[in-house]
Amino acid sequence: MCEALRELMKDEIDQMLEEASAKAYAKAIADGMAQGLEQGMAKGSDNAILSSIINLMDTMKWTAEQAMEAIKVPAADRSKFASRL
């Protein structure tokens, strides 16, 4: 009986599985895009901060620490930027 019901409902079941798969794929794409955007924004922000540090060092003849202090780079992040100079 169960097998006969499955056979009768095969087209509907296949369609439901296809729709569920398409929704899962769309969600995975959206999640990936959101994650990529977040990472890109963070990298862009870091690059802007690094550029500001370099510009202050060049124009004001400040040390990296002075430049980071001036633009209020959190102490926890300073080694990250210092290593990129």
Image (tube, rainbow, N blue to C red):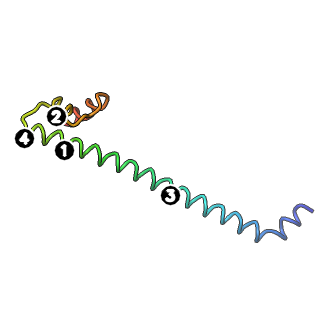
Answer with mark 2 or mark 1, whichever residue precedes in sequence: 1
Label 4 sits on residue: 59
* Residue appearing at x 89%, y 66% in the figure: 4
Residue at mark 1 to residue at mark 3: CA–CA distance: 31 Å
Identified by mark 4, the residue type is: Thr
Task: Indicate the position of residue 59 as horizontal and vertical percent values.
Answer: 7, 41
Disc 4 or 2, which lies upstream in sequence?
A: 4
Q: Secondary structure at mark 2?
A: helix
Seen at 23% across and 33% down, the residue is 83
Alpha carbon distance from label 1 to label 4: 12 Å
Q: Nearer the viewer, mark 3 or mark 4?
A: 4
Mark whose residue sits in front, 3 or 2: 2
Question: Which mark identifies residue 10?
Answer: none
Question: For the residue labelled by badge 4, is the local secondary structure a helix, a strand or a loop?
Answer: helix
Quadrant of the drawing holding the N terminus: bottom right
Q: Which residue is mark 3?
A: 30
Depth check: give the residue in front, 23 or 52: 52
Q: Residue furthest right?
A: 1
Mark 4: few, some, or many residues within 10 Å (few <14, many ≥20)? few
Q: Regarding mark 3 in the picture, which secondary structure is present there? A: helix
Q: Quadrant of residue 76?
A: top left
- Dot placed on the residue nearer the N-terminal end, 3 or 2: 3
Of label 1 and label 3, which has the lower sequence position?
3
Task: Tell me how far mark 3 sits from mark 4, CA to CA.
Answer: 43 Å
* Lateral position of residue 28 relative to residue 48, left or right: right
Question: Where is residue 19 drawn, in percent x and y?
Answer: 66, 65
Residue wearing tag 1:
51
Residue 54 position (above or below residue 35)? above
Alpha-carbon distance for marks 2 and 1? 11 Å
